[in-house]
Image (spheres, helix red, strand yellow):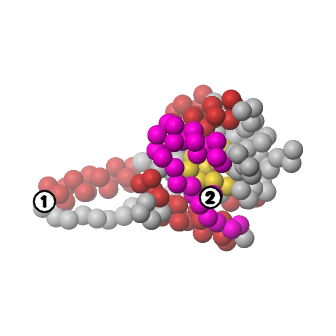
Amino acid sequence: MRHLVALGHRRIVLIARSTRRKPIPGRVELTFLAELAAHGIPTGDFNLPDWEETPAGFNALLTELFRLTPPTALIIEETPRLVAASQFLARRGIMVPEQVSLVCTDYDESLAWCHPPVAHMTWSNQPFVQRIVRWVAAVRGGRNYRATTLLPAEFVPGGSTGPVWEG
């Protein structure tokens, strides 16, 4: 997010699944909104929109987002929706990164095939795997295990982000 703000972006949208937004936004989503606010960017439903989690609902969301005052950057959770958003933008002649920047919160091997590479987050899955192993052992032993593991992530800029388009 800081990378996008440094490039001049102020209309930044995080597209997250409903389990990450409801009943209250998750830790990552709250941090996103707080980071926007820390940079003096007003936050609201535009930045973390609600949408029907279907292909048609996703298309309706993008159509609405790009109807009047479009976002200058989209941060999209999960690669399948990034691919769908890329196709949506291409059908409308909206160029990445010239007119809108794209960032994927997850890394998927398919992103390596994109040219230019897609900006994304990456992290080691090992701490997550270790947590699952501890959870299974606790459940097997009849214990309740509800630890939270924060995974340090690294932003990989790629070529799908650029300065705000002035066209």
User: In 3D space, how far apart are the residues under numbered discs 2 and 1 (Cα atoms)?
Assistant: 43 Å
Of residues 109 and 33, the one nearer the viewer is: 33
Question: What x and y, as percent, mark residue 92?
Answer: 72, 33
Question: What x and y, as percent, mark residue 83?
Answer: 57, 34
Secondary element at image label 2: loop
Is 46 colored magenta in this rendering?
yes
Is 148 colored magenta in this rendering?
no
Q: Which residues are magenta?
A: 41-65
Tag 2: amino acid: Asn
Question: What x and y, as percent, mark residue 40?
Answer: 72, 70
Q: Which residue is mark 1?
A: 141
Residue 116 can be seen in this image: no
Q: Residue at x 45, y 56 (%)?
A: 20
In the rendered structure, the answer to whether residue 135 lies left or right of residue 38 reads: left
Query: Split into 4 quadrants, where in the image is the C terminus?
Result: top right
Tag 1: amino acid: Gly
Q: Which residue is mark 2?
A: 47
**Given this view, does label 2 or label 1 mark the residue nearer the observer?**
2
Residue 37 can be seen in this image: yes
Of residues 92 and 100, the one nearer the viewer is: 92
Give the number of callouts: 2
Q: Residue at x 74, y 36 (%)?
A: 94
In the rendered structure, the answer to whether residue 79 lies left or right of residue 145 reads: right
Of residues 66 and 8, the one nearer the viewer is: 66
Choose the circle earlier in sequence order: 2 or 1: 2
Q: Residue at x 57, y 57 (%)?
A: 48
